[in-house]
């Protein structure tokens, strides 16, 4: 069995973190190192290492994650001002946790520079 991801440990309460949204398939937490006033991670309970690993059978799960992001954007009242959804992938994408998660980032003006 592969080692548990930090997100699996949060789900199993081995690491403490407030779960701010949860369904049978996904959950969300505030990022521990936020880059904006709203920085939420929406995470599938099923561990999928990277977006490269998603399969056709995962499409409903991916939809659940995006839908949760939309709901959380409304809950945090950033739906009109705007926000960014990001899936970092592998080294060049600066992915650090190999359990897919969608970043919901907003609450301030964002810039676009690389
Ligand atoms: P990424 O770099 O796209 O893989 O994103 C991983 C994110 O997980 C980073 O933004 C981290 O700040 C965040 N993170 C890591 N550990 C925790 C934790 N225990 N609780 C909340 N967020 C975390």
Image: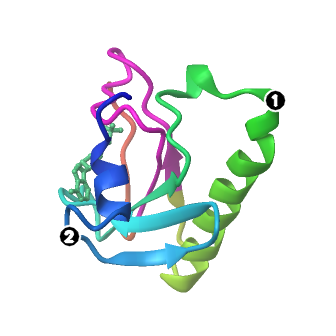
Spot occupied by residue 57 in the image (x, y as percentages of width and height): 80, 35
**Residue drawn at x 30%, y 61% as measured from the top left:** 10
The residue lying toward the viewer, choosing from 24 and 33, is 24
Residue placed furthest toward the front: 1
Answer above or below: position of 51 versus 66: above
Q: On the picture, is 35 further left or further right than 2?
A: left
Q: Which residues are magenta?
A: 84-106
Residue farthest along the top direction in this orientation: 92
Q: How is the image coloured?
A: rainbow
Residue 85 magenta-drawn? yes
Mark 1 surroundings within 10 Å by alpha-carbon count, few (fewer than 14), some (14 through 19), many (20 or more) = few
**Numbered disc 2: secondary structure:** loop
In the displayed structure, would residue 113 be above or below residue 100? above
Q: Is residue 73 left or right of residue 11?
A: right
27 vs 110: above or below: below
Image quadrant occupied by the C terminus: top left
Check disc 2 and report the residue beneath it. 16
Q: Would you call the spot at circle 2 few (<14 residues within 10 Å), some (14-19), or many (20 or more)?
A: few
At horizontal 47% and vertical 46% (from top left) the residue drawn is: 101
Label 1: state its secondary structure: helix
- Tell me residue 59's x, y (percent): 78, 41
Residue highlighted by disc 1? 56
Q: Is residue 68 at all visible to an observer of this figure?
A: yes
* Nearer to us in this view, 105 or 57: 57
Q: Quadrant of residue 89?
A: top left
């Amino acid at each position: 069995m592969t080692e548990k991801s930090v997100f699996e440990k949060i789900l199993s309460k081995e690491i403490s973190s407030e779960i701010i949204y949860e369904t049978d398939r996904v959950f969300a937490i505030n990022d521990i190192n936020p880059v904006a006033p709203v920085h939420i991670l929406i995470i599938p309970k099923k561990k999928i290492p990277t977006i490269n690993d998603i399969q056709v059978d995962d499409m409903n799960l991916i939809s659940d994650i995006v839908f949760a992001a939309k709901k959380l954007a409304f809950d945090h009242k950033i739906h009109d001002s705007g926000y960014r959804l990001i899936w970092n992938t592998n080294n060049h994408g600066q992915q650090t946790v190999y359990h897919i998660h969608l970043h919901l980032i907003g609450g301030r003006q964002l810039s676009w520079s690389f």
